Amino acid sequence: MTTRSSSSGAAARTSDLAYVAVFAALIIALGFVAVPVGVAGVPILLQNTAVILAALVLGPRRGFYATGLFLLIGLFLPVLAGGRTTIFALGSPTIGYVLSYLVAVPVAGVIAARVVDKPKAVKAALFAVAGYLGLAIEYVMGAIGLMFRADLDAAGAAKAQLPFIPTDAIEMAVMVAIAIGVHTAFPHLLRKESR
C-alpha cells in the first residue's frame, strides 16, 4: 500500500511539473505576439491573458509556478513581450504589469479551483469573473507602475490603459472559453487544487 501511494504521489508531482513547464512555454510563446501602442511603448500582448489562462486551467498553485518559471527564465533570456527580459521589465514602465502576474494568477486560480464541481453555466460565469478580476488586477498594478516609472499622474495612468481594454477583453473571453473547453475534456484537472 505504501509503495502504491508513494508511486502515485510521484506520478502526480511529475504531471504537475509537466503542466507547469508546458504553460510556462505557452506564456513565453505568446510573448512573441505583441503590438506596440500606448504610453511608453507598453505593447498590446497575449502574455497578460496567457498567465490568467494558466490560473484558470491549472489553479492557483500550479498557475503561480508556471508564471514564476516564466519570469525566472526571463531573468536570463528575453522571453517577455517585445524580446525583453524580466530585469529590463522591472526597470521600465512595465514593472507594474510584470509584478501583477504574481498577484493576479493566484487570485484567479483560487476562484477557478473553487468552481470545479459547479454546473457548467455557473462554472463559465465564475471562470469569467476570475479571468476579468485577474485582468483588473493587472490593469491597476500596471497603472501604478506607470505612475512611478513613466511619471504619470493617476488620471494619465488610467488613460494609458484605454487602448488595451477592447483587445484584452476579447482575449480574456477567448482564454475563458479555452479553459472551459480544457476542463470539459479533462474534468479532474483542477480537483486536487480545490482541496
Image (tube, rainbow, N blue to C red):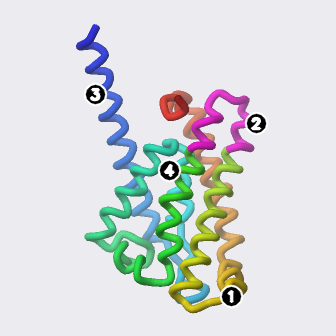
Does the magenta segment cover residue 29?
no
Q: Is residue 22 above or below residue 167?
A: above
Residue 56 in the image: x percent, y percent?
Answer: 56, 46
- Indicate which label's residue lies in the foreground, 4 or 1: 1
Residue found at the far top of this picture: 1
Q: Is residue 165 left or right of residue 36?
A: right
| Residue linked to disc 3 | 10
- In primary-sequence order, the first of circles 3 and 1 is 3
Mark 2–mark 3 contact, CB under 8 Å? no
- Name which residue type carries label 1: Gly
| Residue linked to disc 1 | 156
Q: Residue at x 37, y 38 (%)?
A: 16
- Indicate which label's residue lies in the foreground, 2 or 3: 3
| Residue linked to disc 2 | 121
Magenta residue span:
110-126
Residue found at the far bottom of this picture: 151
Image quadrant for the N terminus? top left
Q: Is residue 157 above or below residue 18?
A: below
- Indicate which label's residue lies in the foreground, 2 or 1: 1
User: Mark 2 to mark 1: distance in Å?
Assistant: 38 Å
| Residue linked to disc 4 | 54
